Structure formats: structure tokens, C-alpha cells
Amino acid sequence: YLKSYELNPEATLCLHYVAEAYDELEQMDNAIKFMQEYIKTNDKYQSHYCLGGYYWKYNEIDLAQESFWNCIEKANDDADSCYYKSLAFYMLGSKTNQEAFLKIAINLDPDKVEYKLDLAVFYEENNNQILAKKYYDLIHKSKKNKRNKLILYRLKISTYSFGGNRIHV
């Protein structure tokens, strides 16, 4: 990716991929450096979320929080933006806001199974089996496109537990 960027400096998305590669190699200094470089040309909420994740892994909690807040502030009110806000609030430890923005994302894009799955898991992790089951049921009733079929298949072979009770979905 670096070579591609050297050959075409306008292909700044390469910097994002370089940061991801360094993250996979656990070279966080380089991951952070290239994500910061990418943000200079693509100052979007998703980039700030990624940078926050890199800081988090590097145990730079204050910088991670700053990046997550930048993600929240830069995000719009479309479904994808609300989803990223929920992820950022999760990292910031705000369950109330995480839940609220997941619900907004679902209302804005009710066909996106990933949002429903995250909310079902949220309820599962917070011992609310009734709401978790509600969203797992909604997932099973979702449109059957390729992406959703894979998620539904994974859910069919999964077992979830709530307070000692096992529930097969």
C-alpha cells in the first residue's frame, strides 16, 4: 500500500490500509502515525473511530477518548453514523448512549441485521433476556440477502445464555 501511495499520492485510502496492516502487526506507533496522516486528507468520523481504537490498544486512554469524541462530533444523523456513535459510546463506557444510538441506527435502516445483532448482544450482556430475544427474533425475520444469510446461519448454530438459562436461536 505504501508503494501505491508513493506512485499515486492522491490515493490516500492507501494510508488507511497501511495503518490497518501495522495494527495487525501490533506496531501501534506506525498504525497511529499512518491513521493520523490519513485523517489529514479524510477527516471523517470512521477514521477517528479507528484512531481511537489504536490509541486504546496502545493504552493511551485520554487520546483514545478524544478520538472517540471526535468520531461522535463529526458523525451525521444517518444510520451508519449513529452506529459508529454507538461504538464510540461503547468504548467510552456509556451504555445508555450506546443503546440509544443503536436503536436510532435500526430505526433509520431496519434491514441492517448487524445493528440488530449488536443490540441483541448488548441486551444479552446486560442480562435483559426479553429484549435480547426480541432482537434475535427480528434478525430471523429479516430479509434474506447474502450478508444476512451468513449472520442467520451463525445464529442458528449458536446458543446464548441468560442468567444460567440456555436459549437456542
Image: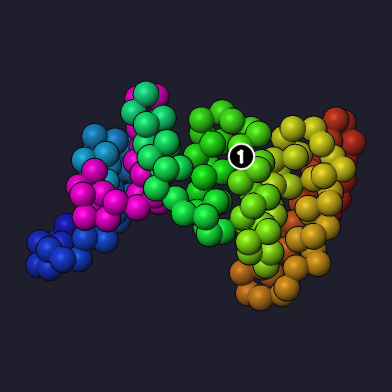
* Horizontal side of residue 25 vs 121, given as left or right: left
Residue 138 horizontal/vertical position (percent): 79, 60
Q: Which residue lies furthest to the bottom in this view?
A: 145
- Quick one: 80 or 162, which is closer to the camera? 80
* Residue drawn where x is 21% and y is 60% of the image: 12
- Quick one: 68 or 168, which is closer to the camera? 68
Q: In which quarter of the image is residue 109?
A: bottom right
Q: Residue furthest left?
A: 7
Q: How is the image coloured?
A: rainbow
* Residue drawn where x is 63% and y is 61% of the image: 108
* Horizontal side of residue 105 vs 163, given as left or right: left
Can residue 57 be found in the magenta stretch? yes
Q: Which amino acid does label 1 sit on?
A: Gln
Q: What stretch is highlighted in magenta?
A: 36-61
Residue 84 horizontal/vertical position (percent): 50, 48
Q: Quadrant of residue 79?
A: bottom right
Residue 166 horizontal/vertical position (percent): 87, 40
Residue 24 horizontal/vertical position (percent): 36, 45
Question: On the image, numbered disc 1 is attached to which residue?
Answer: 98
User: Can the viewer see residue 150?
Assistant: no
* Residue drawn where x is 59% and y is 30% of the image: 94
